[in-house]
Image (tube, rainbow, N blue to C red):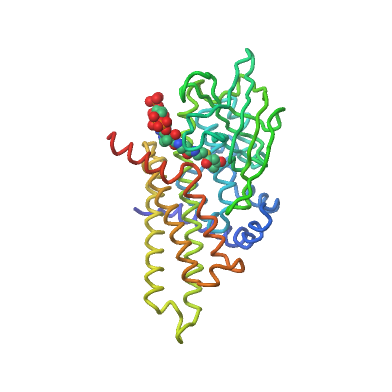
Amino acid sequence: MTIDKDYQELRDMAAKFADKEVGPLAAQIDLDCSIPASLIEKLKEMGFFGIFIPEEFGGAGLDYTSYAIIMEELSRGCASTGVLISAHNSLCNYPILTFGTDEQKKKYLPKLASGEHLGCFCLSEPNAGSDAGSLTTFAEDKGDHFEISGTKNFITNGREANIAVLFAKTEKTKDYKGMSAFIIETDWEGFNVQKCEDKLGIKGSSTAQISLEKVKVPKENILGTAGKGFRIGLETLDGGRIGIASQALGIGEAAFRYAKKYASERIQFGKPISDLQAIQFMLADMSTKLAASKLLILHASQLKDEGVNYSKESAQAKLFASEAAMWITTKAIQVCGGAGYCKEYPVERHFRDAKITEIYEGTSEIQRLVIAHSELSS
Ligand code: CAA
């Protein structure tokens, strides 16, 4: 599998941006638990808020492979910045672009593409995480509008988002078949951020609990067909998982590069520790896991770009890349020893940031379920 010249140029551009504008801020973003407005402005200028939105709606009009490459490089610089862009693009822009009416696309995509509006995805609830189909948020049909009430949990970008793609039951007695998707403007009355989680990692990215109290939603804001919300959610997550796999790859790459540099500078027993096979073997395994992650991500994103079913492949990419990132960041601390464990150096942050990639947008166990179901049904 080869990466053609256009992709290489895109990677060089994203890498340069990550090295110059993002990476140097990452430690402070982790400490402050927020991303500075100046960086958000630069992300807008780069077109990163509308990566695969077509140019007619103000986006960059790139494909999903480009999106994966940008996500990897941004996350190598800062995992919190990476997930802000990932949740916005793949969990909000994508479903509106794919399932929205012409009117919805015209109304919502331009501001999402420019970054004037930030997006989020409200699926999970206190009692509906992996079992997404069991959610209880209810959208009551009031004739000319819906009235939505419920609670949403662990919403990335939830603190700042202007637009939410939100899932609710429109038929209480049905299982996932009674679920529908909606486009919600977060300044509508009754939509409230209840709290933001204090987390282990990706501390610059907000993770909010949101309450909905009789939020009045116009009929025209239903996304796709009523009753098809579960499908819309899962199809959206198929794409999102490529973004999270790329985030994991970027985090792993950052930890690997630091460990490699540290090993060649750290002198013990009269020579750099990179001369020791014990260290070399760890570096070799890190490098191999990164290469394998990259190929799995490229495979999944190319299938998506070709319009071929890629659920299994995106689950494989996310499963492998996230577990690889956790392994690599753990070994990076080991290579760096005491320095790896201290906040003065970046690898402990990479280790903390890596963990979430095994959890959000479907845990590793859910990815295994998706892969097994696909294998057993083919
Ligand atoms: N795309 C489209 N439709 C799909 C699908 C897919 N990838 N996978 C399944 N479906 C459809 C099936 O075809 C079936 O439809 P029909 O009844 O019409 O045939 C329907 O969905 C139900 O399928 P299953 O019986 O397989 O569903 P299930 O209840 O067993 O659950 C699951 C499947 C894979 C476990 C799913 O619930 C799942 O992915 N759960 C994890 C949810 C998740 O990733 N949550 C993360 C939340 S987002 C987030 O992290 C927040 C953030 O801000 C980052």
Figure quadrant of residue 371:
top left
Q: In what quadrant does ligand 1 lie?
A: top left
**Eyeballing the image, is 223 above or below 35?**
above
Q: Position of residue 294 (x, y in %)?
A: 41, 54
Residue 308 shows up from this direction: yes
Task: Determine whether, in the image, residue 216 is placed left or right of residue 371.
Answer: right
In front here: 329 or 302?
A: 329
**Res 113 quadrant in image:** top right
Name the residue at the top extreme: 143
Residue at the (43%, 59%) spot, across then down: 327
The percent coordinates of residue 46 (x first, y second) are 60, 50
- Which of the image's four quarters has the C terminus? top left
Single out the residue that lies furthest toward the bottom. 270
Q: Is residue 128 above or below residue 32?
A: above
Task: Count the marks.
Answer: 0
Q: Is residue 90 visible?
A: no
Vertical order, 97 against 263 (above or below): above
At 36% across and 37% down in the image, what residue appears?
Answer: 308
Task: Give coordinates of residue 355: x percent, y percent.
Answer: 50, 53
Q: Position of residue 132 (x, y in %)?
A: 49, 33
Residue occupying the point 50% across, 31% down: 98
